[in-house]
Amino acid sequence: MNYTNKLLLALGENALLTPDKFTHGKQYTAGLKKWIGNIVPSELLTRSTKQAIESVVTLCECTTFYKYFPDMILTPNYDDKWGVRANYIEINNRAIAEMRNTNCRNGLLSTIKLLPAIPPSAKSWANCIILSQIFPNIYGDGYNKAPNEENSIYGIKLNSGYSKNIINFDITDKISPLEQFHAFNDIAHFHGLKTGFRTVISADQIKITTKGDNDITFDWKNPEHQEIFIREHVNLINTGFEAIFIDSAKHIGGYDMENYTGVGALPDYTQMQHIINEIRARSGKTTLSFIGEKSSGDFIRYENLGLTAGTGFIEPDNYDEVKAHSEKFKYSFSYTPGIEVSNDNDTGGRSYEERLHRINNSLFAYEYPSDKLPSFMQMEDLFPLRYDTNTHHLMMCNPSYSTDGTPESHWENLFAKADGKDYNKKVSDLFYHALNL
C-alpha cells in the first residue's frame, strides 16, 4: 500500500478519490500548471486531509483523474543541479498546526492542506517547499504559549523522534512518523513541488536525548553526536526530501564570526564537508540541494563546502541589478548565490507592493529562464500574516490566535483577511506569467 493511501486509512477515510468541485472554482491554470489562488489560507486549512489530497489530484497536469492515489510518484525532474535555479518557499508548519486550547499538533497535515495553493514548478526551474520544523523543539514542544513567551524553533532535539507539533501521534500505530513524511513528500511531488527542511548547526541550540530521557548539549567534537546528526538527516532524506536549508551556514569553520548570532560552537569547515558528503553518499541521492543561510561573498568557499545555493546575496529590489547578476552566474552549475524576498528574521513592516516587486524580480530578472538566480521566500510572501505578528516572531514563539480555543479560529485569525486575499491574487498573477517560462 502506498503511503498516501495508508495515511487516509489511518485517518479513518477510504482511499477512493473524487474530483474536487471547490478546487475547480478557485483554480489558476498556466498551460498545464494548476494551483489554487485568490484565497486566504483558512479556506484550505479548515478542509479535511482527504479533501486536500483530492484537490491536489484534481490539479494534476494529467488528462485523467486518478481515483486512487498512484503507487509510484517521482520527484519533479530538473536534473541533479536543480537547486541552483530553484525558488525556495519556507512554510512554517508549526504556525499553521492545529491549535486546540493549549495543544499544538498536526502541522504536517496542515501543510498538506496548504499544498494546493503553492504554485507548482515551472518548465525551466523548480519550486521547493522548505518546512520550518521537523525535530522537537527544546522547550514546550506540542504546546502553544503566550504571544511573547519564547518557544523557539531554533532549539531542537535530536535522537528524540519528531515534533509533536508536526506529526499526528494519534495514528502512529497505523502509520509511523517517517511514513507520514513519505506521504507528505509523495503528495507534494505529485503537485509538482520539490521539498526540504530547515536544520540548525549551532551546538548550544541542539540537545541529544539519551536513554532515560536525559538531554545533553550537542558537541561537534563528539563523534557519536556527529553520527547522530548525519543519521537523523539521512533518515529524513530517505522519505523523499531533497533539500536542506542550513541555518548559520555562512559561519561554518569560524568565518565572519563577528556577525554570528547563533548560540554555541559550529562545525569545522572540513567536518561540514564530510557531513554533507555523508548525507549525499548514504542517501544515494545525487539530486540533493544544500542551501546556506547568508552564504554569500566567498562563493568558492561555499561551493567547495558542498552547498548548492546561498541566500542574501543581493537585495532583490533593483530589477536591473538582479538581471545583471543572473547573467554573471549563468554558467555556475554547482553553486549559485541567491536572493531573498524575505527570510526567517523578517520582522514585518514591508509593504505588499515591496514584497510583490521582490517576487517579480525573483521570477523574471534574467535574459533567459535558464539563467535565473535561486530565490528564498517565506510563507508570509504568499499568504500575508495578521498585522501584529511576523515571520521571525512565529519562529521564536508559538502563539495561538484562536478566540475560542479551536484551530479553525486560529487559522482564520493568523493571516490577513480581505487585503491578504487580494495580495494572494496578485502573487498568483505573477506566478501565472512565470510558470510557462
Image: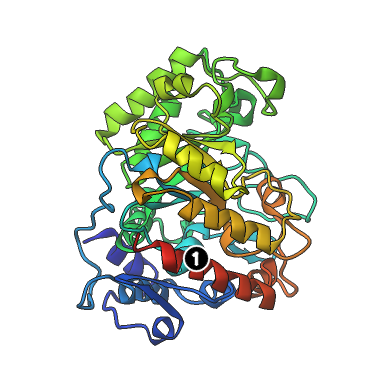
What quarter of the picture does the N terminus occupy?
A: bottom left
Instruction: Report x, y in % for residue 114.
Output: 48, 66
Left/right placement of residue 279 relative to residue 39 reads left
Q: Position of residue 220 (x, y in %)?
A: 53, 17
Determine crowd level at label 1: few under 14, some 14-19, many 20+ residues with C-alpha closer than 10 A: some
Residue at x-position 69% and y-position 70%: 416
Element type at mark 1: helix
In terms of depth relative to the viewer, which is nearer, 91 or 352?
Answer: 352
Quadrant in the picture for residue 312: top right
Closer to the camera, 319 or 342? 319
Give the residue at x 52% y 54%: 166
- Which quadrant of the figure has residue 191? bottom left
The amino acid type, in three-letter code, at marker 1 is Leu
Q: Is residue 52 left or right of residue 254?
A: left
Q: Which residue is mark 1?
A: 430
The residue drawn where x is 59% and y is 65% is: 383
* Residue 217 in view: no
Rendered position, 106 above or below 210: below
Rendered image quadrant of residue 232: top left
Q: Quadrant of the C terminus?
A: bottom left
Q: Is residue 363 left or right of 92 when viewed as pictured?
A: left
x, y percentage for residue 410? Answer: 67, 69
Tell me: residue 385, above or below residue 74: below
Q: Position of residue 350 (x, y in %)?
A: 72, 55
Q: Nearer the viewer, residue 24 or 428?
A: 428
